[in-house]
Amino acid sequence: MKTSALRNAISIALFATLSGNAGIALAREPTPEATRADAEQEDGAGQGTTAASSPSKPASRKEATATELETVTVTGTRIRGGTTPSPVIAIGSEQIRQEGFADLGEVVRSLPQNFGGGQNPGVVTATGSGNMYNQNAGGGSSLNLRGIGPDATLTLLNGRRLAYGGLMQAVDISAIPVAAVDRVDIVADGASAIYGSDAVAGVGNVILKRDMEGAVVSARYGRASRGGLGTREYDATAGTTWSNGGLIATYRHTRIDPISVGQRSYTRHMDQPFVLYPGGDTRSGLLSAHQSLGGNAELRLDALRTTRDTVYYQTGPGIYYDQRSDSTTSFLAPLLEVGLARGWVLQVGGVRARDENIGRAWLVTKATGDSRLVSSLCRCNDSRSYEISAEGPLLELGAGELRLAAGAGYRSNELLNRNLSSGTQVHSEDSSRFAYAEVNIPLLDSSMGTSLARLLELTAAARMEDYDSFGRVTTPKFGVIYAPGSDLTVKASWGRSFKAPTLNERYGSLVAYLVPPGMIGGSGYGADDAVLLSWGSNPGLGPERATTQTISVAFHPERLRGLEAELTWFDIDYRERVVQPFAAFGQVLSDPAVAEFLRFSPTPEEQARLLAIYSGGFFNWTGKPYDPAKVVIIGHGEYVNAKTQRIRGIDLSGSYGRDLGSGRLTLRGSASWLDSSQQNTSGQAAFDLAGTIFYPAKVRSRLGLVWASGGFTASSFANYTGGVAYPALAQETASFTTLDLVLQYATARRRSAGTGFDLAFSIQNLFDRAPPLYRPMAITDAPYDSTNYSAVGRFPSITASWRW
């Protein structure tokens, strides 16, 4: 679409939004949910794990002049100060501090609804690490709700998209400095109708602090008791406000030592060098500013830049790969918000985000020490978006205002795969034009004097996206919020989601591995036999579609203030999901379900044609020269559209806090039960994902206590992950339970003015629990599931902060 056509589309959408609103002069106040959450944070109680507060009718006020701008942000809806029919997990800065999290990667890994696989630094990238979505190549951390994949969970910063990054085009949430974060909202429900593609499993929205007066500097040091993971972190955050604006800026530098296989008793049999957790340096800076432009307009700007250098090793027979990853993430997002007459607000904004990941690999021969550069690639991602939107009341109903949010815009993603050694490159781009609308319809509330309900609201949203590659698609979502009384709220939602395959899945590099059959589950083969495996992109991939449903019941009794609990059932029917047909690298030849992707007795000509298109590199793990006559099988592991994935389960979360003497005691926890399966083709039976190795465990939970009194805070949380099965060898791992302890003392309350000194001592995995082990097929595989369990062990750390 040309620029003029896009401009016309945006104008039409905005005119349609505003044309029917003459004579209406109503605006909406912040919801009681937001007010209650603010009060809990103010008194140090810590935000609950759920946003399950008792809803009631929002106040209305007559307004003849332009709307006074509000700053209430609710993730999961574009209605200002509105409610969403989807459950929202809200993790505030006070909770992050109380539980001793050092970065947002630790925050999301603690959530039972999130899977530790995907792009995470603790994942061992080797033959046994499951599917290729499980990576530590960039050293970052991705949000991976329900274990569907990091590309199926949308990650936002102040409501706007960050760039894809790394090998799997996941978004590194740990690139955002935690010192600047006000809260993290996570909607574990399909949200494509609200936010567009990628939000199949849900959305995570990082909300930055808006105002700060003063400065804070801090330093943290920690080291795993069994060795490795020496961590040095330095933070500086400063902010100021003036009569009509303010800004906050933060800088963070982190240096981490790796954990090698020789530092853990259960991996000392593995060849060195080999790392279980990569080392490296991270430097991150963030700026967030806002400036009022008169009484009814405000300009906002968020900017982020992060660089990360990571080092890791992988070992094969007689050789190892020395691999380095250098990543740079940047984000620039200006936004103009204007209050219009009759309670309407107009927003015009844009985002420019980039992520450049340069990966290099040297093949080192152990006997001689000779090294040779075998791979040097830049995966350069560039994202741009422009959007105009408006929100406000359409008419007054007996139970409140019927409100509408609508907008339109343009979004593009570019991927440049550049071979730095040969100079060759592949450039790919996909763009879409979009328009959306969302409406909130209050039908009943307590002021109407009806016995049917204290609250009844309907919500509806629809989004149209017109892709260059896949054409036009529309995704709807409908919801209902019902409160029969003041103690109970029932929410239900139904929606459809659409996701375009990532550019890396369609046009990224292809990689070939030459491996001995025994490394990938084969038996009975000759000592010189080899298998040629292909991994990587497929330009013929089609789009993915899903139908999502959730029902939640929130309990918040008026007579027992401080108690909140929520039970959620969810179901995701995910069709044409892009997957790699080999569920786990180490099981390629032992899994009968993938037989159709194997080509036996390939000719040298077939091998040559395959290798001619592999721009991502050729990795020889046999320890012997490549000989086409010795290749007995070609395994085609390129991306394909699976017939279906089915993901369903139950979440339970809650918190209870009460004052005891001079302090406050809070019990907080959550648990998730997950059942998921996949069917690759019509002729193949479905097979389990959840509860099997390198996929999410069926049960995860986190439960703990927080005690706060004056400047002293103590917290302890237990983390449970169920065991998983290894079908290839009929093995099952044990469950994994760890205990965390945090002790903190502040000389002054964090919300009071003046100078203060904070000291925090934290121990993760207090009893030094080792990960549950299994017996892998290959000696080159780590003997534990690094996507579900951690090799870090006991990790004590101390943090000192000075504020003024």
Image: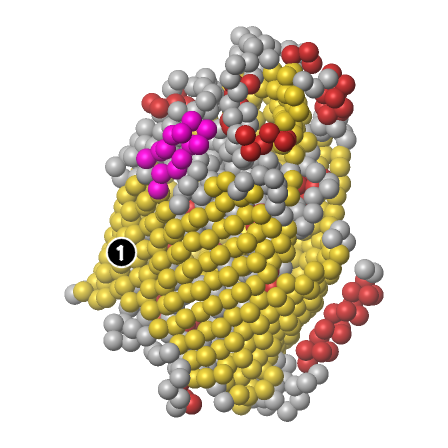
| Picture quarter with the C terminus | bottom left
619 vs 357: above or below: above
The magenta-colored residue range is 722-734
Is 29 within the magenta? Answer: no
Going 29% across and 55% down the picture, which residue do you hit?
746
332 vs 609: above or below: below
210 vs 357: above or below: below
136 vs 589: above or below: below
249 displayed left or right of 34: right
Going 57% across and 79% down the picture, which residue do you hit?
403
Residue found at the far top of this picture: 368
Secondary element type, mark 1: strand
Of residues 120 and 329, the one nearer the viewer is 120
62 displayed left or right of 637: left
Task: Using the rendered image of the protein, determine whether residue 645 is visible from the camera's viewpoint.
Answer: yes
Going 29% across and 76% down the picture, which residue do you hit?
558
467 displayed left or right of 456: right
**x, y percentage for residue 779?**
45, 19
- Quadrant of the rendered structure where residue 14 is? bottom right
Of residues 167 and 63, the one nearer the viewer is 167
Residue found at the far left of this picture: 661
| Tag 1: amino acid | Val
| Picture quarter with the N terminus | bottom right
- Quadrant of the rendered structure where residue 628 is? top right
**x, y percentage for residue 455?**
42, 80
**x, y percentage for residue 314?**
52, 23
Task: Determine which residue is flagged by label 1.
Answer: 706
Task: Using the rendered image of the protein, determine whether residue 363 is visible from the camera's viewpoint.
Answer: no
